Amino acid sequence: MRPRLARWARRLGLALIALFAALTLAAAAYDLATPGGRPARILHAGPFVRVGDRLLAYRRWGTRGSPVVLLGGFVEPSDVWRKVGPLLARAGHRVYALDLPPFGYSERKGPYDPHTWTAEVEGFERALGISRPVLVGHSLGAATAVGEALRRPSALRGIVLLDGDALRSGGGAGWAGHLALDPWLTALYRFLTGWDFLFRRVLRQAYGPNGPPLTHAELARWQRPFRVAGTAQAFKEMLPNGIAGWTTTDLRGVHGVRAVVAWGALDSVDPVAAGRRTARLLRAPFLLLPRAGHLSMLVDPRGVAAAVERVLR
C-alpha cells in the first residue's frame, strides 16, 4: 500500500510542477503579447518639474493670488482636481496639483513613504517659487499634508485633510513583496489594470451614488497612468508597507498650522468616524459634504473649494 501512495504522491508532485511551469510560460507569453510600460512624457504632455533626481508631473490653474497645492491619494492622478482647481483659480488663487509618485505621471523612483513625499512637496514648492501655500491632501495624500505641517509649520498657511485621516495602518508582511515575482506579477498587473469591469466596480464605490457616468473616457482617465514605466515594480515595493501615515501622537503634535478636515458623508472607503477622530486630534473643525463619497473633489467640488477657503480666511 505504501509504495502505491508514494507513486501517487510523486505523480501529483510532477503534475503540480508541470502545471506551475505551464502557467509560468503562459504568463511570460502574455507579458510579451501585451504592451509594457512607457515613459510618462509619452503618455502625458506635462508640465513636469525636476525635483532632486525625480521628474514630477503637475497641473496648474490661475496666475495670481494666494497659492494652494493639491495632493491626490492612492492611484489618483492630478486630474482628479480638474473641477476644484478652476473654482479656486476663479476665486483668486494660484492652484497647483501634484502627482505624488508612483501615481499619476511622475517618475517612478522610490522610496514611497510620507517622509519622501513630504520632501518632494517641499522641493516642488521651492522649484516653482510657492510660498506659504494651503496644502490639501486627499485620502493617502493627507499624510503628506500632515508631514509638512510637522516638519515646517511656518512654511504653510494651512492644511486641509480631505477623506483621509493621515494615520498609518497595516504593513509588516515583508513576505508579500517576495511572492510577487515575474512573470506572474507583470501578467497579473497588466490584466487587472486593463480590466474595465474592475475599474467600474472600484470607481462606483469610490464615487458613491452621486458620481458621474462611468464612460469609456472616464475609465481611460484612471487607467492611463498605470501604463507609466515602473508602476508595477513600484506597487511591489509598496505592498509590504501597508497604508502610509503617522501616529495619533504625531497628529497631536501639529501646532501653529490652521487645519480643516472635510469628508464625504457617503464615503464607503474611509468611514466618517475616522475623519472626526483626526479632526479631534488636530483640534480642527470637521466639515461634512452631504452628497459626496470618497472622491469628494469630483462629486462636490464647490464643497471642497469652500473647505479650502475656510483655511484662507
Image: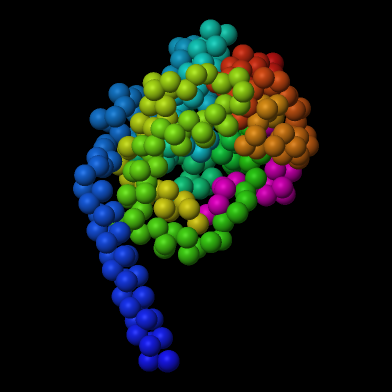
Q: Residue furthest bottom?
A: 2
Near-viewer residue (26 or 234) = 26
Establish if 156 lies above or below 234.
Answer: above
Q: How many marks?
A: 0
Q: Which residue occupies the foreground of this view, 244 or 189?
A: 189
Whether residue 169 is visible, yes or no, is yes
Characterize the magenta stretch by its predominant secondary structure. Answer: loop
Q: Position of residue 162 (x, y in %)?
A: 63, 29
244 in magenta: yes
Q: Farthest residue toward the front?
A: 1
Q: Residue at x 41, y 86 (%)?
A: 5
On screen, residue 129 versus residue 23, left or right, reads right
Please tell me which residue is depicted at 35% across the width and 70% down the height of the picture.
Answer: 16
Asked if 78 appears above or below 14 in the picture, the reply is above
Rendering coords of residue 144 (x, y %): 56, 39
Decide: is 265 above or below 192. Answer: above
User: x, y percentage for residue 294?
Assistant: 61, 30
Q: Residue at x 60, y 54 (%)?
A: 170
**Residue lying at 38% horizontally and 88% vertically, measured from the top left:** 4
Using the rendered view, name the quadrant where residue 180 is placed. Answer: bottom left
Find residue 260 and report its horizontal and vertical position in percent: 70, 27
Q: Foreground: 242 or 266?
A: 266
Horizontal arrangement in the rendering, residue 157 relative to residue 76 (left or right): right
Residue 138 shows up from this direction = no
Q: What are the residue bounds of the magenta stretch?
A: 241-257
